[in-house]
Amino acid sequence: MPREHTPTVSETEVALVADQASLGLLRFDEALRVRTANLAAHHALERRPGSLLGRTLMETFVDHKLEDLVRAAADGESGVRESDSRDRTSIIVRARPASDGGAWVTIENVTELQRLRRIRSEFIDNLSHELRTPLANIRLLTEMLLDDLENEEVSVRMRERVATIDIETGHLVQMINELLDLSRIEQTSTQVRNDKVLLAPLVASSMRRLHTFAERQGVVLVELVPDDLPPIRGDEERLDQLLMNLLHNAVKFSPGGGTVTVTSDEHPDGVVISVADHGVGIPTKDQARVFERFYKVDRARERGLGGTGLGLAIARHIAEAHGGRIWLESVEGQGSTFSFSLPFA
Ligand code: ADP
């Protein structure tokens, strides 16, 4: 192979390109000193351009958690950490081992993203509060109207229309309440309660409360969570809300005669709770999106099953606020299994 075809790029050239990137890029050598740092890295760490070269870990980050992260990467273990220590600057730092010792580090500045998130949250909060009062009035008036109609000679159609207004207003009120709930959970996601929670009794009590709804739908609830499951640390009320959302969906989307089963799976570092149904299932293309706010698979809408599309968004926030995650497996037409993990204390 002729030599001139082998592409070579000088280190200076790489550095020039790296300076164009908005992602902060740092390379630590084996002695854990900065060997390369692009402009964005200097900006994210609030340093004068060029001043990071040769710095130690401590001098670079002034944050022992970030130092540990990079040290672990140099020892072969990749990792990621969020940090917002510097005057309201939020960064996400990722570190991975470099091939010849040391570590590569990327720094993503998410300050603006978080500011926008906060604004969105406040907007939803304000809007929901504003909508609450007029809605409560409409609801009250509709109920009064329904009462009035009891003693009047009116057509069935009219009675039905008012009844529908009443039902739809109820949906709106529920949606507003869930929106407020979601924005509250989002704003306090890092500070849920830290009580000792036994999962078996929690699952049993959620199931008891759903019993009537399940019976009406002709669905059987089965609980397979062992009583001796070690306790986890968390917020009982929120975990109950998470479970109720999953169970409610499972029953809602099950056919008459179906079964909804709750199981648990104990791991060394935590427990996984799963809620399985044999209902309509969720198409593959929608699976990644059902945890987004307001996302609904079309059919659910067509079948007029109500619901706000917020339940799973709330569920995801609760799982993540507990240091866990939530996911689903589903085959369209065969059923869905929603699972969430919770780490042990
Ligand atoms: P909703 O209030 O509409 O139930 P969720 O956020 O709880 O809102 O769920 C979002 C959407 O995900 C639902 O509208 C439905 O299309 C789908 N979904 C959730 N759970 C199930 C399930 N167990 N089986 C089938 N589809 C489901």
Image: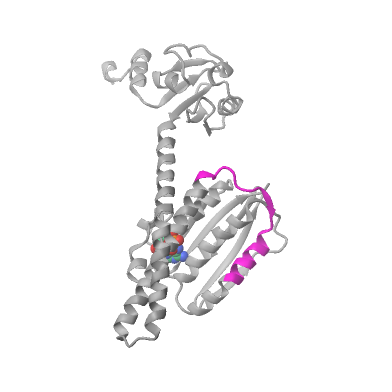
Total labels drawn: 0
Instruction: Classify residue 198 as left or right of residue 59.
Output: right
Q: From the image, which quarter does the N terminus lie in?
A: top left
Residue 343 percent across, percent down from the top left = 63, 48
Instruction: Classify residue 202 as left or right of residue 5.
Output: right
Q: Work out whether 216 lies above or below 199.
A: below
Q: Which quarter is ligand 1 in?
A: bottom left
Task: Kindly indicate the quadrant of the structure image that contains residue 70.
Answer: top right
Q: Work out whether 11 lies above or below 136.
A: above
Identified at 55% across, 76% down, the residue is 212
Identified at 55% across, 59% down, the residue is 241
Residue 255 percent across, percent down from the top left = 44, 76
Q: Kindly tell me whether residue 281 is visible in this rendering.
A: no
Identified at 37% across, 82% down, the residue is 149
Residue 3 percent across, percent down from the top left = 29, 16
Q: Nearer the viewer, residue 23 or 131?
A: 131
Question: Is residue 242 on the magenta stretch?
Answer: no
Q: Nearer the viewer, residue 89 or 135?
A: 135
Identified at 51% across, 76% down, the residue is 219
Instruction: Classify residue 240 as left or right of residue 306.
Output: right
The span picked out in magenta is: 187-209
Q: Nearer the viewer, residue 178 or 136?
A: 136
Q: Kindly tell me whether residue 165 is visible in this rendering.
A: yes
Question: Is residue 200 on the magenta stretch?
Answer: yes
Q: Work out whether 120 lies above or below 303.
A: above
Task: Kindly indicate the quadrant of the structure image that contains residue 67.
Answer: top right
